[in-house]
């Protein structure tokens, strides 16, 4: 099953590169996404299919990330068709091939049960995303691509060094040297401590760069500011979730090695620092796409913070992968529509989006309310569970800071978002032909529906999956 | 065997310092290319009993690090028509001193970390750490895009040296994947350099400031 889920998107990417028609090519994305999502549901219902080989196993945390990304990709793929209809002047060959390529690489990341293979796949996500950032061919998008490639490559190089340190931790302890995840996990308590500590720091910094944790987040505002909305959605919900899965792996190894205290301190520090940086830069941010980038930094911080609290907060953290990914989809896709309707992303020009684009404007506002943790949306439940976990774990200072930062971010982000949606556009702002169409609006409405649904009730199968993942992470059978 | 290996590693360390102190980019690329070939030699020395997959891996590493990537970079350099790194953030002499300090620091750190018995007496760990730090110095102190790529390559070389400690843990297929990723990464980066050059008429990353806050 793993091979099918990995090879199918790559085959479709090759097909996309071969199809000559610019008009028909984008339809390959929804086609692939529908089949891929069907395969995801199929495999999630049949545990027997989840073990393909010792290197390719779909473990419980992997299942959640797979579910989150394939759902997000499904909606994004339909949106892409609508989006590319507005970009007929440019060949979308590379765009479509890279989007499908991402799906394939992501599939390797979630299936891989070998730390080396996972590293290769995550580096692969860096490479397939780079041409997507460069789609607009403006000097600013080149600059963003450059920064992404350099920062991302250095980060991923550190992660490789960390992976090697981890392997050496077992060599030094006199064990058979291996990077197969299951073997490392079994011998975790025997690993050489100094090497394990060094490996943890390098892996956290390395994969943290890919996630966009502060202070390695500097590529994020540049990239998210320049990319088309749909690519931003894939970044904020997809690429970052893949990197977080890598962090989950190392978390699990350290937990099994009995290093929770050492690890928690670093994770809490990184998480709170990311949220602080996001809060500071969101204040008076005039570029609404950059605001979204800082929001992504914030939510990566929340994920890491949740891991740092551990135990009772793990359920919320894993749920947050899903709710954050889907809500980011709503925000980036609707902000892409607003950007196109005004041909600007500065709040000096973009005002009154609710009037010009009633649907996208409303969804943008709703997405903002959801991502900042307002009830009754999904992120409220996950953030509340993390907060609850912090209190349960007796970390009152952390919980207090967490709440305070959420409040600061709510106010900072709210100012920008309300400026965009409220009021009326300045007179001199020209009209652009863009109006919400079926393909560019319906996927966002459905995503928003899902975000709302997750806030109202967590379906029983998902609940079981989340509980499985928590026990798996904690090493309980 | 260990003496020979250490001699090669010392040459690699010296080449790091040479790269830091040279303004002609062409010479730096050549240095990195020779360094790549030496890494292959070091890999041969580490392995007492060569198997076919390992030998294949070493050949691929030499071809990619020593020949393919340098030739891609030379081409990018030719297209961009630049010769020298002018006025780096940290001057050439201070960078050499910094590099030497980094090497000393790496020796200190490596002394702190416990080694497996078969690796005592080799300079693999300190050389690896020192080379990684030199790569970092390169990345942050140079403005030309191509110099930053060279810094990245030096950093990767440092990681490669570390991987020599555990060739058994990294199955050949993963090692190949790593090499391929490195190669494709550099390839993509060089394409972007070309576009930077066309769009900004310069390869100077200081021109890339339009996205500053």
Image (spheres, coloured by chain):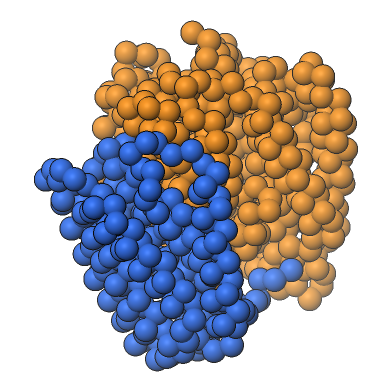
Chain colours: A orange, B blue
Quick check: A1 left or right of A360? Answer: left
Outermost residue toward the top in this view: A477
Above or below for B56 versus B98: above
Above or below for A156 versus A195: below
Residue in the image at 40% along x and 15% along y: A45
Figure quadrant of residue A269: top right
Quick check: A15 left or right of A180? Answer: left
Looking at this view, is A77 or A283 the one in front? A283
Looking at this view, is A61 or B24 the one in front? B24
Residue in the image at 39% along x and 73% along y: B15
Q: How many marks?
A: 0
Q: Is residue B71 visible?
A: yes
Q: Position of residue A164 (x, y in %)?
A: 42, 42
Q: Position of residue A94 (x, y in %)?
A: 36, 61
Looking at this view, is A187 or A287 the one in front? A187
Residue in the image at 51% along x and 55% along y: B107
Q: Quadrant of the N terminus of chain A?
A: top left
Q: Position of residue B111 (x, y in %)?
A: 52, 47
Above or below for A430 versus A443: below
Quick check: A185 left or right of A344? Answer: left
Looking at this view, is A114 or A296 the one in front? A114
Residue in the image at 58% along x and 66% along y: B101
Above or below for A445 versus B40: above
Q: Position of residue A159 (x, y in %)?
A: 48, 46
Q: Is residue A449 visible?
A: no
């Amino acid at each position: 099953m793993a091979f099918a889920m990995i090879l199918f998107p790559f085959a479709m990417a090759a097909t996309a590169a071969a199809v000559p028609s610019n008009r028909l090519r984008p339809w390959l994305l929804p086609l692939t996404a529908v089949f891929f999502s069907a395969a995801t549901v199929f495999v999630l219902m049949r545990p027997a299919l989840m073990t393909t080989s010792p290197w390719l196993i779909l473990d419980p945390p992997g299942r959640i990330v797979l579910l989150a990304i394939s759902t997000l990709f499904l909606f994004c793929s339909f949106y892409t068709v609508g989006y590319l209809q507005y970009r007929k002047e440019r060949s979308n060959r590379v765009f479509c091939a890279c989007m499908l390529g991402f799906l394939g690489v992501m599939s390797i990341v979630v299936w891989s049960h070998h730390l080396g293979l996972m590293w290769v796949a995550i580096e692969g996500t860096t490479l397939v995303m780079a041409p997507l950032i460069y789609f607009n061919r403006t000097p600013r998008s080149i600059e963003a691509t450059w920064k992404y490639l350099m920062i991302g490559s250095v980060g991923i190089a550190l992660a490789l060094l960390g992976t090697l340190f981890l392997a050496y931790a077992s060599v030094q302890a006199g064990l058979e040297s291996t990077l197969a995840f299951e073997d490392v996990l079994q011998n975790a308590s025997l690993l050489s401590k100094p090497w394990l500590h060094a490996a943890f720091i390098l892996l956290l910094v390395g994969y943290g760069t890919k996630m966009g944790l502060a202070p390695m987040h500097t590529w994020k505002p540049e990239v998210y500011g320049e990319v088309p909305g749909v690519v931003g959605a894939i970044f904020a919900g997809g690429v970052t979730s893949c990197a977080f899965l890598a962090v989950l792996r190392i978390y699990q190894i350290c937990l099994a090695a009995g290093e929770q205290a050492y690890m928690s301190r670093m994770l809490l520090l990184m998480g709170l620092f990311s949220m602080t940086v996001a809060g500071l830069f969101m204040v008076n941010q005039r570029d609404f796409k950059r605001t979204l980038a800082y929001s992504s930094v914030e939510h990566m911080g929340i994920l890491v913070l949740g891991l740092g609290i551990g135990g009772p907060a793990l359920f919320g953290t894993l749920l947050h992968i899903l709710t954050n990914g889907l809500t980011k989809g709503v925000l980036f896709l609707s902000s892409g529509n607003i950007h196109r309707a005004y041909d600007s992303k500065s709040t000096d020009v973009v005002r009154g989006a609710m009037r010009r684009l009633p649907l996208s404007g409303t969804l943008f506002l709703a997405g903002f309310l959801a991502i900042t943790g307002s009830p009754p949306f999904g992120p409220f439940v996950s953030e509340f569970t993390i907060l609850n976990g912090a209190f349960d774990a007796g970390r009152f200072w952390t919980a207090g800071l967490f709440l305070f930062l959420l409040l600061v971010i709510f106010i900072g982000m709210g100012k920008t978002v309300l400026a965009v949606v409220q009021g009326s556009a300045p007179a001199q702002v020209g009209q652009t032909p863009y109006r919400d169409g079926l393909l560019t609006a319906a996927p966002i409405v459905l995503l928003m529906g899902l975000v709302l649904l997750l806030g109202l009730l967590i379906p029983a199968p998902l609940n079981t999956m989340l509980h499985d993942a928590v026990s798996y992470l904690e090493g309980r059978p | 065997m260990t003496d020979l290996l250490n001699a090669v590693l010392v040459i690699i360390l010296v080449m790091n310092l040479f790269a830091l102190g040279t303004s002609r980019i062409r010479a730096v690329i050549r240095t990195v290319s020779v360094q790549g070939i030496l890494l292959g030699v070091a890999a041969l020395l580490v392995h007492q009993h060569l198997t076919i997959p390992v030998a294949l891996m070493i050949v691929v590493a030499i071809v990619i690090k020593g020949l393919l990537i340098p030739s891609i970079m030379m081409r990018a350099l030719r297209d961009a028509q630049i010769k020298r790194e002018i006025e780096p953030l940290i001057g050439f002499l201070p960078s050499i001193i910094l590099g030497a300090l980094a090497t000393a620091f790496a020796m200190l750190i490596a002394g702190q970390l416990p080694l497996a018995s078969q690796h005592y007496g080799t300079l693999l760990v300190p050389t690896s750490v020192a080379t990684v730090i030199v790569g970092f110095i390169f990345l942050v102190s140079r403005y030309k895009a191509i110099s930053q790529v060279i810094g990245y390559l030096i950093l990767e070389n440092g990681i490669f040296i570390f991987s020599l400690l555990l060739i058994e843990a990294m199955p050949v297929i993963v090692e190949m994947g790593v090499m391929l990723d490195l190669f494709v990464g550099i390839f993509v980066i060089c394409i972007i350099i070309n576009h930077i050059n066309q769009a900004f008429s310069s390869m100077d990353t200081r021109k890339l400031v339009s996205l500053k806050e």
